[in-house]
Image (cartoon, grey):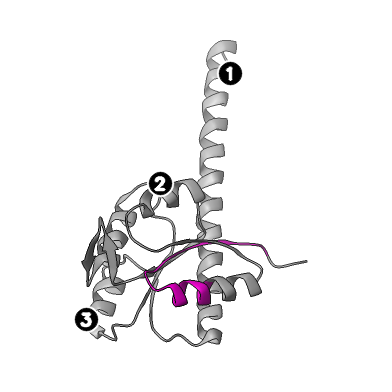
Amino acid sequence: MPAPKFKVMIVDDDDIQLLYCKEVLLSMGHESISLSDGDSVIQKARDYNPDLILLDLQLNINGEYYEDGGYKILKDIKSKKDLKHIPVIIISSINSLSYQLKCILSNHCEDFLVKPVKRQTLEKKIKQNCQIGWINKEYIRINDEYRKLKQSKNLYERLTGQ
């Protein structure tokens, strides 16, 4: 049985990093979409429905550079009911333990990688977290189906008097 094809959104203002991540994902057989700033992450995540988001910590948002722009976007993603299930890995050139702890311990992101990321490490983290993202999406889908079935059953019982 072939490995499932996952969808990954990459957000990084470094074109080389974007190409590197896209190439790794392509070699793994996955789809990807790239954004070079933080302006439309929320809407693109809703439209694309990724299994994983790779997010740079330092980003431009609305034309302004932020050292922690990725963290702001991360908090925004995790505050949205329809997006909070998506695993996020912060990838940053900042080797700051305080940022790592802030992100991970606040339960906002699943992992924190420091650039340059070794290919083997990136592949491992993508595989692990895409599977988590897919499971989260399936859980939501199954719960929605269950709710619909339960509503249909309740309606049937009311209409038939059973």
* Residue occupying image coordinates x 51% and y 39%: 144
Q: Which mark is residue 98?
A: 3
Q: Secondary structure at mark 1?
A: helix
- Label 2 crowd bin: few (<14), some (14–19), many (20+), radius 10 Å: few
**Label 1 or label 2, whichever comes before in sequence order:** 2
Identify whether 131 is placed above or below 152. below
* Residue occupying image coordinates x 56% and y 86%: 120
**Residue type for callout 2:** Asp
**Residue type for callout 1:** Tyr
Figure quadrant of the N terminus: bottom right
> Across the whole image, how many numbered discs are drawn on residues?
3
Q: Are marks 3 and 1 in contact (CB under 8 Å)?
A: no
Q: Which mark is residue 156?
A: 1
Q: Which residue is mark 2?
A: 82
- Looking at the rendering, which quadrant does residue 17 occupy? bottom left
Q: Secondary structure at mark 3?
A: helix
In reply to whether residue 15 is colored magenta, the answer given is yes
Identify whether 24 is placed above or below 149. below
**Label 3 or label 1, whichever comes before in sequence order:** 3
* Residue 130 x, y percent position in the rendering: 54, 66
* Residue 131 x, y percent position in the rendering: 56, 66
Instruction: State the CA–CA distance, disc 3 to disc 1.
Output: 56 Å
- Looking at the rendering, which quadrant does residue 14 occupy? bottom left
